[in-house]
Image (cartoon, rainbow, N blue to C red):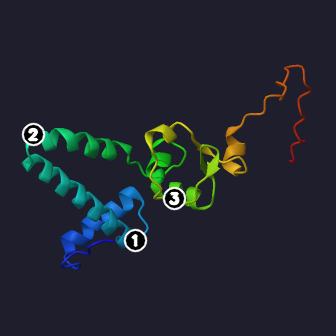
Amino acid sequence: MFTSPRNPWRSDQLSQELFLLGTYGLRNKRELWRAQTRLSNFRKQARQLLAASSDVRGREEPKLLGHLNRLGRLQTLVWKRGLAKSPYQARQMITHGHVALNQRRITIPSYIVSPSEEGSLSFSDGSSFFKLTQAPATAEPISAEAPAEEAPPAVS
């Protein structure tokens, strides 16, 4: 669920939304609005905790902070780890099945990755990107004694 802006045609709001879409590689504005609504809900919970008594605050604050620390989008992690050149490429790689977590192929770019899963982020086994990252271990080095190719005769 999400809430759309009250006035979606303000030029400053449009430019800010386009900037956020491009920066984080979001598919459309609905996805942006969904993320903004979740963020708004977290802010509301934090404000309520600040206004609560110290007993309630001491009990509920670690829960909220722990939950926020566990949040991480797969698309952003793939991009920031250097597996993709841009957030859009990361999204495409995930959608096409090139990315795996715990040896399991994930095809949802907005998948929430826990900190324990972050270490197992890699290319899936059948991916062409996986084959590119694997260096051939049995390749023999080229020796200096190998015959040099002759240059073709010059045409006058």
Separation of marks 2 and 3 at Cα, in angstroms = 43 Å
Element class at badge 3? helix
Image location (x, y in percent) of residue 46: 17, 50
Separation of marks 3 and 1 at Cα, in angstroms = 13 Å
The numbered dot on residue 28 is 1
The numbered dot on residue 91 is 3
Residue type for callout 2: Ser
Q: Which residue is disc 2 drawn over?
A: 54
Horizontal placement of 59 versus 87: left or right?
Answer: left
| Residue at 90%, 35% in the rendered image | 150
Residues 111 and 84: in front is 111
Image location (x, y in percent) of residue 62: 25, 39
The nearer-to-camera label among 2 and 3 is: 2
Residues 117 and 133: in front is 117
Residue type for callout 1: Asn
Element class at badge 2? helix
Report the label total. Answer: 3
| Residue at 45%, 44% in the rendered image | 114
| Residue at 41%, 48% in the rendered image | 72
Element class at badge 1? loop
Q: Which class describes the residues within 10 Å of circle 1: few (<14), some (14-19), or many (20+)? A: few
The numbered dot on residue 36 is none
Ranked by sequence position, the earlier of labels 2 and 3 is 2
Residue type for callout 3: Arg
Q: Which class describes the residues within 10 Å of circle 2: few (<14), some (14-19), or many (20+)? A: few
Separation of marks 1 and 2 at Cα, in angstroms = 41 Å
Q: Are marks 2 and 3 in contact (CB under 8 Å)?
A: no
Image location (x, y in percent) of residue 136: 78, 33
